[in-house]
Image (cartoon, rainbow, N blue to C red):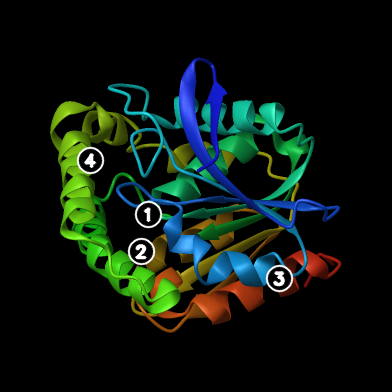
Amino acid sequence: MPIIDINNKKVHIQELNKVAKQTVVLIHGMFSNLSVYYFNIAPILAQHFHVVMYDLKSHGMSERVLTGYDLDHMATDLLDLMDHLQLEQVFLVGYSFGGLIALKTAILSPSRIQKLVIMEAPDPQDEKARDIIEEYSKEFLEHYVANFTDTTKVKMGKRQMEKNHRQYEFLFQQTSIKTDMVTEKHFLEDIRHAQLPMPSLLLYGADSNCRPTGEWLKEQINHASLKLIPGDHNIPIQEPTRIAETIVHFFTNIFIKNYG
């Protein structure tokens, strides 16, 4: 279990294909963990890239932290992780609230992001979207168990399930996560004024409540394209192979701006 120390906080990371020349960093959403990528999406990406996954603070096997869930802190956490791993420039993928972290990171340090994939990032101002994402997040544990069982043929025990539930209860009830997310409700306004020079791919579920946000982002980001994937907010679980192959194609092809 690789645990690294960054700014006196323990961060759980997983890496695949360390010898590859180019690196992809994957950011999971709030109330989930890196396993959303680990079993299906990451192995496909690792056929081409060095893949880095990490658990956000208080998620998965990373250290529990009471505060610092706003986008500035979360993006800084990521940049500190990249510094620790000596990653000067990466391909960046963010899912759900992790997509907002990816966008914030690209705004803060655009020179370090070669290409950007935003998957199902919500509008933080949309209270209905926040509630639905919270609902999906609670359902994530069930998907995690099914995925874990199908992939490793080992069923997660009751003790581990209880540990996971305690962890997410801690997040919901004891940390500043909900308050910090609410303070970011106007974050998308920053996108209107941001200069994002890197090619960007927006992946959204065709039936997702977040789809309008993806369509809006396409109009705001100069070098962005939007691709709809069959499914809803849980497309990484519903269509992992399609998503992985789409990301590989995007990262391995030369970007040509559409001036039309």
Labelled pair 1, 2 in contact (Cβ < 8 Å): yes
Residue 226 position (above or below residue 60): below
Numbered badge on residue 167: 4
The mark closer to the camera, 4 or 1, is 4
The residue under the point 67% across, 33% down is: 82
Labelled pair 1, 3 in contact (Cβ < 8 Å): no
For marks 4 and 2, the one nearer the N-term is 4
Residue on which disc 1 sits = 122
Q: 203 or 142, which lies in front?
A: 142
The residue under the point 30% across, 36% down is: 181
The amino acid pointed to by label 3 is: Val
Of helix, strand and loop, which one carries label 3?
Answer: helix
Name the quadrant containing residue 193: top right
Residue 130 lies left or right of residue 114; in this view the side is left
Of helix, strand and loop, which one carries label 4?
Answer: helix
The reply to whether residue 191 is visible in this rendering is no
Residue on which disc 3 sits = 248
Q: Mark 4 and mark 2: span between their CA atoms? A: 26 Å
- For disc 4, the neighbor class at 10 Å (few under 14, some 14 to 19, many from 20) is some
The amino acid pointed to by label 2 is: Cys
Check the picture and name the quadrant holding the C terminus.
Answer: bottom right
Q: 258 or 67, which lies in front?
A: 67
Of helix, strand and loop, which one carries label 1?
Answer: loop
Q: 58 or 195, which lies in front?
A: 58
Residue on which disc 2 sits = 210
The mark closer to the camera, 3 or 4, is 4
For marks 1 and 2, the one nearer the N-term is 1
Task: Tell me residue 48's x, y (percent).
Answer: 77, 67
For marks 1 and 3, the one nearer the N-term is 1
Name the quadrant containing residue 183: top left
The amino acid pointed to by label 1 is: Pro
Q: Mark 3 and mark 4: span between their CA atoms? A: 33 Å
